[in-house]
Image (cartoon, grey):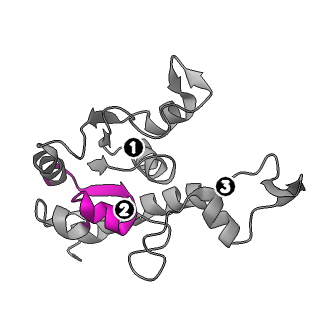
């Protein structure tokens, strides 16, 4: 049982892969914006085809982090789950009560996956990271100069964002396996 607090690509891909392997996934979405992919083009019956593809086989609830019931709902979901996936900078996760220490209070056997571009500590820990940012840092983004400005070449696709999702799913599986074998 997985609770997915992530948006866009990496976290939703991780939970999608786990759902394909038989996990029961509940996605927690903002009541107005939903997942960041919902509005992307092209759309299928008013919803982004990417959102449909990444979230097929999952259930969804919506609640605002500002709701008076946020802590109660996240605690209940965490208590129900084997693992949570959080896509956030560490400081944002802590501010929303989605850091490991906060969620562990509801479930001492919880497997926690934080999809964060720069890790938990260090000078870049709280920097935003998206697919192109990570790929550029790895030297993977080909650019062309247009009117004196660098532009990503047409057809470029991120490797970092989907790979983060694949490795997130693998990490969750490894964590659940280790926990269930008595390894903590």
Cα distance in 3D space between marks 2 and 1? 12 Å
Picture disc at residue 122: none
Q: Is residue 80 magenta?
A: yes
Cα distance in 3D space between marks 3 and 2? 22 Å
**Residue matched to label 2:** 172
Q: Pointers 3 and 2 in contact (CB under 8 A)?
A: no
**Residue matched to label 1:** 19
Mark 1 burial class by Cα count in 10 Å: few <14, some 14-19, many 20+: many
Q: Pointers 1 and 3 in contact (CB under 8 A)?
A: no
Answer with mark 3 or mark 2, whichever residue precedes in sequence: 3
Q: Residue at x 38, y 35 (%)?
A: 34
Q: Position of residue 17 (x, y in %)?
A: 46, 48
What is the magenta range?
79-99
Residue farthest along the top direction in this orientation: 45
Give 11 or 118, whichever is nearer the viewer: 118
**Residue matched to label 3:** 158
> Image quadrant for the C terminus?
bottom left
Q: Nearer the viewer, mark 3 or mark 2?
A: 3
Q: Position of residue 146 (x, y in %)?
A: 88, 52
65 relative position to 162: left or right: left
Q: Residue at x 82, y 59 (%)?
A: 143
146 relative position to 21: left or right: right
Q: Report helix, strand or loop for mark 1.
A: helix
Q: Report helix, strand or loop for mark 2.
A: helix
Using the image, determine if residue 120 lies above or below residue 34.
below
Answer with mark 1 or mark 3, whichever residue precedes in sequence: 1
Residue farthest along the front direction in this orientation: 148
Mark 2 burial class by Cα count in 10 Å: few <14, some 14-19, many 20+: many
Q: Is residue 109 visible?
A: no
């Amino acid at each position: 049982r997985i609770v997915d607090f992530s948006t866009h690509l990496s976290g939703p891909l991780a939970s999608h892969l786990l759902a394909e392997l038989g996990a029961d996934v509940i996605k927690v979405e903002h009541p107005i914006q939903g997942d960041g992919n919902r509005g992307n083009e092209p759309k299928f019956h008013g919803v982004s085809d990417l959102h449909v593809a990444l979230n097929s086989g999952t259930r969804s609830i919506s609640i605002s982090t500002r709701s008076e019931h946020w802590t109660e709902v996240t605690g209940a979901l965490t208590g129900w789950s084997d693992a949570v996936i959080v896509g956030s900078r560490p400081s944002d996760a802590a501010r929303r009560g989605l850091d490991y220490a906060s969620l562990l209070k509801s479930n001492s056997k919880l497997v926690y996956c934080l999809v964060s571009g720069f890790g938990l500590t260090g000078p870049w820990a709280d920097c935003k990271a998206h697919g192109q940012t990570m790929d550029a840092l790895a030297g993977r983004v080909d650019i062309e100069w247009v009117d004196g400005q660098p532009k990503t070449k047409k057809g470029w696709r991120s490797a970092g964002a989907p790979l983060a999702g694949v490795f997130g799913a693998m990490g969750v599986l490894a964590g659940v396996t280790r926990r269930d074998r008595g390894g903590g």
